[in-house]
Image (tube, helix red, strand yellow):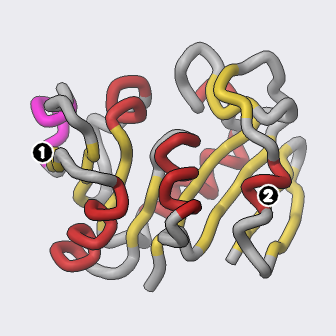
Amino acid sequence: MAVRASLVLGADGSTTKGATSEAISSPEDRVRFLSQRRNADCIVIGGNTARHERYAKTPVDLIIVSHTSPDLLLTNPRAHWWNMHPSEAIEKARSEFGSTIAVEGGIAFISELLTQGLIDELSLSVTEVVGGENLVQLEQLLSHFSHIEKSSESDTIFYECR
């Protein structure tokens, strides 16, 4: 029963490469990411994520928070478009779908929710990829949490933050 964000970073703090997180993900990251989202009542993403990532099929309802109508409404029958502030979307998602919410937006979207204290847990993966865009400081993300567990698998470091 939590709002859980997932984010992958390259070793240099990049959150995208070529405008997508897929280019910085690792096989180990992908397995964990897909496993976690299956346990959610819904997935919440921002407009940029809707435009650049693959969300044509999701295991649960997909909430797209954006000022403009996303094309995903045409391809994903579980997609919903909400033109509102991210914090309002979290509250509405909780009331309409349940208390276990997966946030899979980009760094700007997640940072907004972190600043407002609306992310209960962060699942963070750090891969060896460098040379991407949208850089973020790992320490800045971790500073929002009091309990952090670190592990690694192959070439990916995982942080589970609460």
The dot on residue 6 is none
Q: Amino acid at mark 2?
A: Phe
Q: Quadrant of the N terminus?
A: bottom left
Decide which of tag 1 and tag 2 comes sooner along the chain.
1
Residue 23 or residue 94, whichever sits in front: 94
The percent coordinates of residue 60 (x first, y second) are 28, 60
Q: Is 95 situated left or right of 114 in this image?
A: left
The dot on residue 158 is 2
The percent coordinates of residue 133 (x first, y second) are 67, 21
Residue 99 higher or lower than 11, as above or below: below
User: Label 2 crowding class (10 Å Cα cut-off): few <14, some 14-19, many 20+?
Assistant: many
Mark 1 element type: loop
Q: Is 97 situated left or right of 24 in this image?
A: left
Dividing the picture into quarters, in which one does residue 20 lie?
top right
Dividing the picture into quarters, in which one does residue 101 lie?
bottom left
Is residue 79 visible in the rendered structure shown here?
Answer: no
What's drawn in magenta, residue-wise?
Answer: 72-77
Question: In the image, what residue occupies the spot 83% across and 22% down?
Answer: 130
The dot on residue 77 is 1
Q: Amino acid at mark 1?
A: Pro
Residue 63 or residue 90, whichever sits in front: 90
Q: Quadrant of the C terminus?
A: bottom right
Q: CA distance from mark 1 to mark 2?
A: 32 Å
Question: In the image, what residue occupies the spot 27% across and 60% down?
Answer: 89
Is residue 157 visible in the rendered structure shown here?
Answer: yes
The percent coordinates of residue 116 (x first, y second) are 50, 66
Q: Is 39 situated left or right of 88 in this image?
A: right
Mark 2 element type: strand
